[in-house]
Image: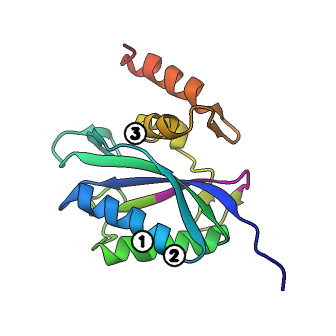
Amino acid sequence: MGLAVKTRAVLAFGSNLGNRKKTISAALKALDKHPKTTLMASSSFHETVAISIDGPDDSQPKYLNAVAIVETKLNPKELHELCQEIENKHGRLRLARWAPRTLDIDIITFGVELVETSKLIVPHPRAHERQFVLEPWLEIDPDAVLPGKGRVQNLLANLKVSNGTEK
């Protein structure tokens, strides 16, 4: 039997209900404990305003966000299922697309693979528009590249200029 190839994946975590830091930390540990997945790096926590279908929404609780890099022997579908299983264990309810949540784990990249199914699109189609993904990702991988979009450093700089948040 051949050895499964390890793939480097970038995952984004968000939580705006319950003990956000404890939940994300537990999710990171759960990923690392899985026999086919190893946590390589995780960012610090970043607090951000909730995003709704209409944009930033101050009426919802603030999110705590983080990004992690894992190496996995799982395929994209299996990794997605594992992430959903971890979300469910932490009380994730899928009532509405933009609803507050105890835990959200998105696969941002899976190596350089392009995945498009009814349940999963990788690279994540909106990652390049999300400062709360790009900033923590850049923190743990200064040379990061989002396939099809370019260097994360440039994407973040362009996003800050367009948002007027450049310092």
Q: Classify residue 119 by image quadrant.
A: bottom right
The residues tagged by marks 1 and 2 sit, at their Cα atoms, a distance apart of 6 Å
Residue in view at x 33 percent, y 66 percent? 26
The residues tagged by marks 3 and 1 sit, at their Cα atoms, a distance apart of 22 Å
- Disc 2 element: loop
Q: Classify residue 20 by image quadrant.
A: bottom left
**Amino acid type, label 2:** His
Residue 144, disc: none
Nearer to us: label 3 or label 1: 1
Please report contact status of discs 2 and 3: CB closer than 8 Å, yes or no.
no
Q: Nearer the viewer, residue 140 or 163?
A: 140
Location of residue 32 with respect to 141 vertically, above or below? below
Mark before the other along the chain sequence, 3 or 1:
1
Please report contact status of discs 1 and 2: CB closer than 8 Å, yes or no.
yes
Q: Is residue 23 left or right of residue 70?
A: left
Residue in view at x 44 percent, y 39 percent? 136
**Amino acid type, label 1:** Ala
Mark before the other along the chain sequence, 2 or 3:
2
Residue in view at x 62 percent, y 37 percent? 144
Residue 34, disc: 2
Please give the residue where the numbered disc 1 appears in the rendered image: 30
Please give the residue where the numbered disc 3 appears in the rendered image: 132
* Magenta stretch bounds: 106-114
Q: Pointer 1: residues within 10 angstroms few (<14), some, or many (20+)?
A: some
Q: Position of residue 120 (x, y in %)?
A: 59, 64
Q: Pointer 3: residues within 10 angstroms few (<14), some, or many (20+)?
A: many
Q: Position of residue 150 (x, y in %)?
A: 67, 32
